[in-house]
Amino acid sequence: MTKDETVEKIIDESQQGSTLAIEKNAKNTRKLYIESYGCQMNFSDSEIVASILAKEGFNTTQELEEADLVLVNTCSIREKAEQTVRKRLEKFNAVKRTNPGMKVGVLGCMAERLKSKFLEEEKIVDMVVGPDAYKDLPNLIQEIDEGRNAVNVILSKDETYGDVAPVRLNSNGVSAFVSITRGCDNMCTFCVVPFTRGRERSRDPQSILEEVNDLWERGFREITLLGQNVDSYLWYGGGLKKDFDKASEMQKATSVNFAKLLELVALAQPKMRIRFSTSNPQDMTLDVIEAMAKYENICKYIHLPVQSGSNRILQAMNRLHTREEYFELIDNIKNIIPDCAISQDMITGFPTETEEDHQDTLSLMEYVKYDFGFMFAYSERPGTLAERKMEDDIPEAIKKRRLTEIIELQQKHSHYRTQQHVGKIEEVLIEGPSKKSDAHWMGRNSQNTVVVFPKENYQVGDFVNVQINDCTSATLLGEALEYSKNN
């Protein structure tokens, strides 16, 4: 597994910069071109934007040259994504010279951070729209139509987009993302999300269930409940998570936490596969693990970022858990769901990280033996607490070596975990043709491992029992035996 492959699970490199295309409405006369970068939240947000603009007379196009409005949905997590977006903006501006009527807008996390730079200093865009302001797009578009620049990067305390049905774009028609929370209250020192996406608020469970039921009716067979930190989902009639202590007794008694939401969704569609991402060790509670064990349709897979194995570094990162608490959580997961897969996020080379801290990370990985992971060398992100208060003092060469050691250890563990499936019969949901062979289907088992097997007469969207005969370090190889009971 190369570094890029390991990153793919969260920031899917193959999807970066992809454009959206949805069914055309004959009455719409204007054309929208929208590109997305970054995490799944951004791709999910682009669907919401397309849905809002479809009502404003815009059909999507994949031809940049014919667009009336060009939007790029941006990410601030990694420097590489920002550089790519800048290059794209230069390209859009070159096209603009031949098509002066075209308007260009920046959406998402980078918009929030670089608003004045884009609009005033560099004058490269007409519109800047933060992640909470998409409902204001109709007004903003009217502003730019009338020749003014438009900005709305106000972070909301209550916007969850629960009442906007996202248009499903670029989907395989089988798996869909359902956003359940927005924003984040965890002030991890390396992360810009709380500053770009605002305080944490949860979406009304009723609107989530309606979306899930609608997806099932439309043929989707798997959903991923999405949030910056899903475990802290908490609905008590609206309002911020941090204000829950001010709620009335009645609100508290009828509140819905993440474990309860999982149960509601699992019961609403017993044959729909349910996944969720991302979890935070400090917020993951036993009742979530118990709900996963109780309902067969909740997949046995948890993405559980740890970032470092050293207590000193965890504290510097403002991760509100220790190494020992993390081990206790891992033990609970393995005791309650023995076949649960666990994946990690790891940052190496965080400011002040010593060789001893690095060894702590490697020993933590040995303890858990993750199924897969996403591993990065630390890069300072503008606007974060770490950037303001800590010196990025680990030399690049040392970061690189430590990252290589972490990736190599993860590859070893990935292979070990993949081998444990060989010889078993596992349910696989077919997502599409294998990348390497048109004669094979590709799907995933409950643990989120990719399974490849000959097509025979099965179809995309089928649940199939597959006999696992062999594996590579990241992929299971097998043959279909029959439809599973969920089909």
Image (cartoon, rainbow, N blue to C red):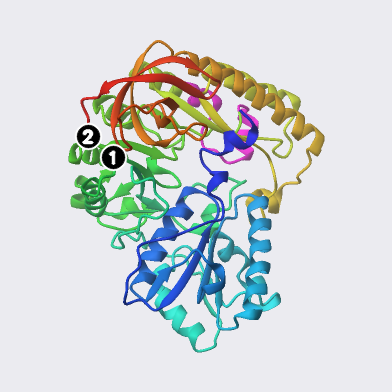
Residue placed at 40% from the left, 18% from the top?
Answer: 334
Question: Is 352 left or right of 475, judged from the image as shown?
Answer: right
Q: Position of residue 428 (x, y in %)?
A: 34, 27
**Rendered-image quadrant of the C terminus:** top left
The answer, for residue 460, to whether it is visible in the render is yes
At x 69% / y 41%, what residue is drawn?
378
Q: Circle 1 sits in a helix, a strand or a loop, which is it?
A: loop
As shown in the figure, which amino acid type bears the numbered disc 1? Answer: Arg
Q: Is residue 233 above or below residue 106?
A: above
Which of the two residues, 360 or 219, is positioned nearer the viewer here?
Answer: 219
Residue 360 in sight from this viewpoint = no
Crowd tier of the residue under label 1, counting other residues whose Cα lies within 10 Å: few below 14, some 14–19, many 20 or above: many
Query: Within the magenta stretch, is there residue 188?
Result: no
Position above or below: 199 against 136: above
Mark 2 and mark 1: span between their CA atoms? 8 Å
Which quadrant of the figure contains the N terminus?
A: top right
**Which residue is most to the bottom?**
146
- Mark 2: give few (<14), some (14-19) or many (20+) Cα within 10 Å: some
Question: Is residue 325 within the magenta segment?
Answer: yes
Picture coordinates of residue 470, whole percent (x, y):
47, 14
Residue at mark 1:
221
**Part of the protein shown in magenta:** 309-327
The disc placed on residue 55 is none
Could you say where residue 201 lies in the image, as x and y percent from the top left? 37, 54
Residue matched to label 2: 271
Q: Mark 2 or 1 closer to N-term? A: 1
User: Which residue is found at the position 69% from the left and 26% from the top?
Assistant: 358
Q: Residue at x 74, y 36 (%)?
A: 352
